[in-house]
Image (spheres, rainbow, N blue to C red):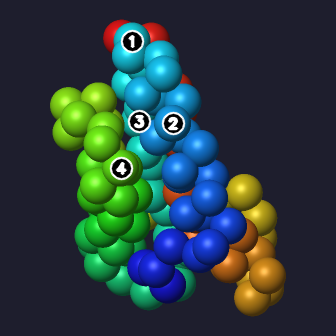
Amino acid sequence: SNELSEKALKKLDQLAAFMIQNYGIKIFVKGYTDSSGNYNYNLWLSDIRANIVKTYLISKGIRPYKIETRGMGPENPIASNDTAEGRNANRRIEIEIIKD
């Protein structure tokens, strides 16, 4: 899904508040997919996921240049893609905090 859950929104609200309080912070948002389907489609989809997070953070007052995004597709799975639970875990966003 490309919709942010209530849990994700709360975490992003906390991140936005943290970034506003700590001006010298940038973030790197990486979107991931599971391995099912076409590789190029998954790269595109993961990029969309990362940019949904960026758009939300911008709506909370974070400047666009503070947010780098990249779609990683099915790279670096954190669970097996052989089960529904594993595929669900692999469809994720990771956010790395970087000092400016």
Numbered badge on residue 24: 1
Which quadrant would residue 46 be assigned to in this image? bottom left
Say what secondary structure mark 4 lies in: loop
Q: Earlier in the sequence, mark 4 or mark 3?
A: 3
Q: Report x, y in % for residue 81.
A: 70, 76
Q: Report x, y in % for residue 57.
A: 37, 50
- Which residue is disc 2 drawn over? 17
Q: Are marks 1 and 2 in contact (CB under 8 Å)?
A: no
- Which residue is disc 4 drawn over? 60
The CA distance from mark 4 to mark 3 is 17 Å
- Which residue is disc 3 drawn over? 28
The CA distance from mark 2 to mark 4 is 9 Å
Q: Residue at x 30, y 78 (%)?
A: 41
Q: Residues within 10 Å of mark 1 (few under 14, many from 20)?
A: few
Say what secondary structure mark 3 lies in: strand
**Could you tell me the amino acid type at mark 2?**
Ala
Q: Residue at x 42, y 28 (%)?
A: 20
78 up-or-down from 1: above or below: above
The CA distance from mark 1 to mark 2 is 13 Å
Say what secondary structure mark 2 lies in: helix
Q: Earlier in the sequence, mark 3 or mark 2?
A: 2
Say what secondary structure mark 1 lies in: loop
In the displayed structure image, the side of residue 88 where residue 70 appears, left or right: left
In front here: 51 or 41? 51
Q: Earlier in the sequence, mark 1 or mark 2?
A: 2
**Could you tell me the amino acid type at mark 4?**
Lys
Res. 76 in view: no
**Could you tell me the amino acid type at mark 1?**
Gly
Q: Report x, y in % for residue 75.
A: 52, 55
